[in-house]
Image (spheres, rainbow, N blue to C red):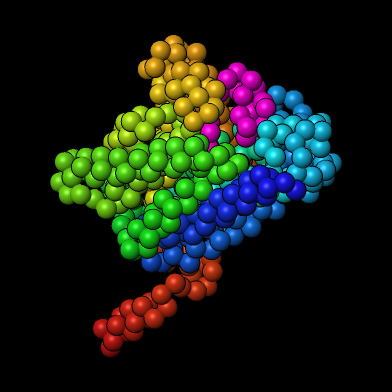
Amino acid sequence: MDAKIAVDTLWVLITAMLVFFMNLGFAMVEAGFARVKNCVNILSKNFVVFAVSSLGFLFIGWGLMFGDGNSFIGLKGLFFLTGADNSPAIGEAYKGVYSSLSWTGVPLLAKFFFQLVFCGTAATIVSGAVAERIKYKTFIVFSFVITMFIYPVVGHWIWGGGWLAQQGMFDFSGSTVIHSVGGWSALSGILVLGPRFGKYNKDGSMNPILGHNLTIATIGTFVLWFGWFGFNPGSTMALIPDAISHIAVTTNTSAAAAIMSSTILSWIYLGKPDLGMTLNGCLAGLVAITAPCAFVSIGSSFIIGTIAGIIVVFAVIWFDKLKIDDPVGATSVHLVNGIFGTICVGLFAQDKIAGVATGNGLLFGGGTKLLFSQLTGVVSVGIFTFLTSYITWQILKKVMGLRVSLHEEIEGLDIGEHGNSAYPEFINRKQGYSFLEKK
């Protein structure tokens, strides 16, 4: 193995590990935005979902996504990476099996591991949106469906040489492939589940349900921000100094701009600089820059982030007005800004700015060609993902049941689903006080 392949492999594996570390970030953000009585349930779902992703993607998802087949789906290389030489060489070893990945020369299993951690991210997005009322076992089954079929099919269209790639759509690190897919799946789940008990009144007014620990939500957001420096620069799948430096700076600039715009807007609109909005603003900026990070200038990334921070604040408010109960704001962050980030490629792209030939976007004299390709991807992925996930949720609702009982929801899923509590001393103390008051 020559030195370049060795260095590229090390880069790919380290960045993949950073993306894996984002699972902790999602767990902390979701747990912090949930109530005390549901903390164990959130943590357990986030822990188990990566195991589900690992197995589902290994068995079938990987081949459906990257295996050679037709423009809709991969048909080769299913089941434990069969049918391909695990050589690091580019070219012949992958022809007829994983041709869409022949552009990078790292070993096949390094490619698999990097794509696996991305798959796990898409599945994790759903967890927070359906939190505090979904049955644990039903969520696990849905996670298998998204990792074994929904995510891989969309991934094949865009990253596996499928029809959207052939039409000229670009999504460097997954604003659509990962974040929109997770967001559409989450939205369909919310609609089938319905809102949490007590969230909305009969007159249409809303009762705020506050998260129990903004400290760990903030820690989680920092972890995600850190992990994104593997998420975006790592998608080069090679140690290319100029490209990864450019991508790291566009990624950070967008996040920083979104933090400031979301904070200022929430301060103006809500009267106070709401920390929850600030945290989701950061994530919105990161999601929005994920597709265009390698295709836009630093200045454009600032504009993209600024707009993303504004969008997420209004999206959270808008979804609440529609009675779409998303405890962590996942749809506002991942769906809305996943769509926005994908469109930004068609608006702000500058050809070969970090080495990738995309052509110029609309705002840089490229006309509407690239923008049309991006919009085609947004619409087609939205229709496919929403319909397949909605049908899946409905089937699971009839076969397994989707929502816990009202009693269990009021008591908390920690006790009902898991038989324990994240804060047993706190719970026992409260019960003790109640007993003393009765005495």
User: Is residue 436 in sight in this rendering?
Assistant: yes
At a point 40% along the width and 12% down the height, the residue shown is 365
Residue 168 shown in magenta: yes
Given residues 83 and 379, the one toward you in this image is 83
Given residues 300 and 426, the one toward you in this image is 300
Given residues 232 and 420, the one toward you in this image is 232
Q: Which residues are magenta?
A: 155-175
Q: Within the image, what quadrant is residue 297 found in?
A: top left
Give x and y (percent) for residue 26.
Answer: 46, 55
Give x and y (percent) for residue 240.
Answer: 55, 39
Q: Is residue 163 shown above or below 16? A: above
Give x and y (percent) for residue 29.
Answer: 41, 56
Report the side of 51 relative to 414 (left or right). Answer: right
At a point 46% along the width and 73% down the height, the residue shown is 421
Q: Within the image, what quadrant is residue 392 found in?
A: top right
Report the side of 210 relative to 50 (left or right). Answer: left
At a point 27% along the width and 53% down the height, the residue shown is 275
Q: Is residue 363 shown above or below 253? A: above
User: Is residue 324 in sight in this rendering?
Assistant: no
